[in-house]
Amino acid sequence: MVLAGGEGKRLAPLTRDRAKPAVPFGGRYRLIDFALSNLVNARIVRIVVLTQYKSHSLDRHLAQTWRLSPILGHYVAAVPAQMRRGPRWFAGSADAIFQNLNLLTDERPDVVFVFGADHIYRMNPRHMLGEHVDSGAGITIAAVKVPIEDAGGFGVIEANKSGKIVAFHEKPDNPPHLPGDPTMAYVSMGNYIFDRDVMVEAVTTDAADDSSNHDIGGDIVPRLVDGGLAHVHDFSAFEVPGQALEDQGYWRDVGSLDSYYEANMDLLSTHPMFDLYNQEWPIYTANSPLPPAKTVHEDGDRTGVAYNSLLSDGVIVSGSTVRYSVLAPLVRVNSFALVEESVLLDRVSVGRGAIVKRAIIDKNVEVPEGAHIGVDPEADRQRYTVSENGVVVIGKGDKVEA
């Protein structure tokens, strides 16, 4: 089960017209592609994606991209909120599972992977499955080490030497640090393996509790920890095929505009923190019939060049300069324009002589000739969304003034 129903309010305006897992990333991918690729690469090929808010673009992406082999019983199926338990939407991640327990009746699995849909990482879930079976736990939680100052936004885990979780703190004000390292904490990645019967009992009991928020991290996990049923899987202790040293243990929760921007920038160095070019554990996505990217013109100062950037299919850099940027399919940057440290999504057009710096521009935006974005912070704040770290964000199809 892949949980893909989140609104992603902190990613607005990128989530104004789409669910968070459908947000484009890295030029040609969607956020959900990373979780699905990890599962499919590990030959976990019966997958349901639980959707809810603004799911049209997500549903279309799943239908057009994630077609596995039906003759072998493999599938990735979008499952919208169906109100099977009454006239209400999902009240939380645990309630999403509870309202879809019929899926377990149909498939009769021994264990159930419950993964989030909006993180950037590579992992082999079968390593986690092996630990789950060996430990005899009712739930196994994938965890990663993060700086202590960042841990308050996550579920923080305390485990003993055998990997048994002895305490779990959901988004604590004062997160406990790792033993012997006051600078780091152990946090949940939002990826779980449940024994089926343990999960059914847990979400059914939770559904009957009117005081619950019906959340896996906030409600289900603490109860299972108290019952001695929870085990931790150290994500960073395992490698996947083809993984470079630089991106071992890489995991990013792109829950805010700044974290989304920084994760895109992580793709751009010579030895990137996250390597999209690992073909032994590929990240799958849609293949569009688009022409190759190109740079054109070499005429004095009217030269099309791109430095340390990702250029997707159909991109044209025409007599302009692109530096440290991610350009999605069909972006066009016209003569004498400058794009620097920016993320441009599909079909963005940057007009002649325009300047775009430290910006995220969503699909179908036309930056007019001579416009300046990311140059004057005060002017940007009056016209656009600006993140805490000063990244300018322009929504899908929004009008940009010259």
Image (cartoon, helix red, strand yellow):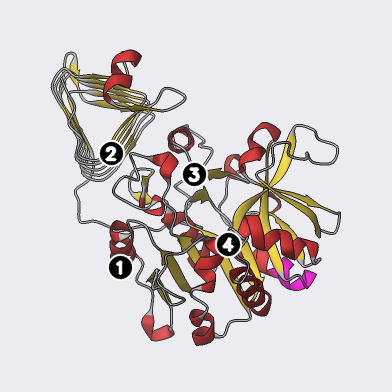
- Above or below: residue 352 compared with residue 234: above
Ranked by sequence position, the earlier of labels 1 and 3 is 1
Ranked by sequence position, the earlier of labels 2 and 3 is 3
Res 108 seen here: yes
Q: CA distance from mark 2 to mark 3?
A: 23 Å
Assign the magenta stretch its main secondary structure: helix
Amino acid type indicated by mark 2: Asp
Q: Which mark is residue 63?
A: 1
Label 4: which residue? 214
Q: Is residue 256 magenta?
A: no
- Name the residue rendered at 42%, 28% in the picture: 387
Ranked by sequence position, the earlier of labels 3 and 4 is 4
Q: Quadrant of the C terminus?
A: top left
Amino acid type indicated by mark 3: Asp
Q: CA distance from mark 1 to mark 3?
A: 26 Å
Label 2: which residue? 362
Amino acid type indicated by mark 1: Ala
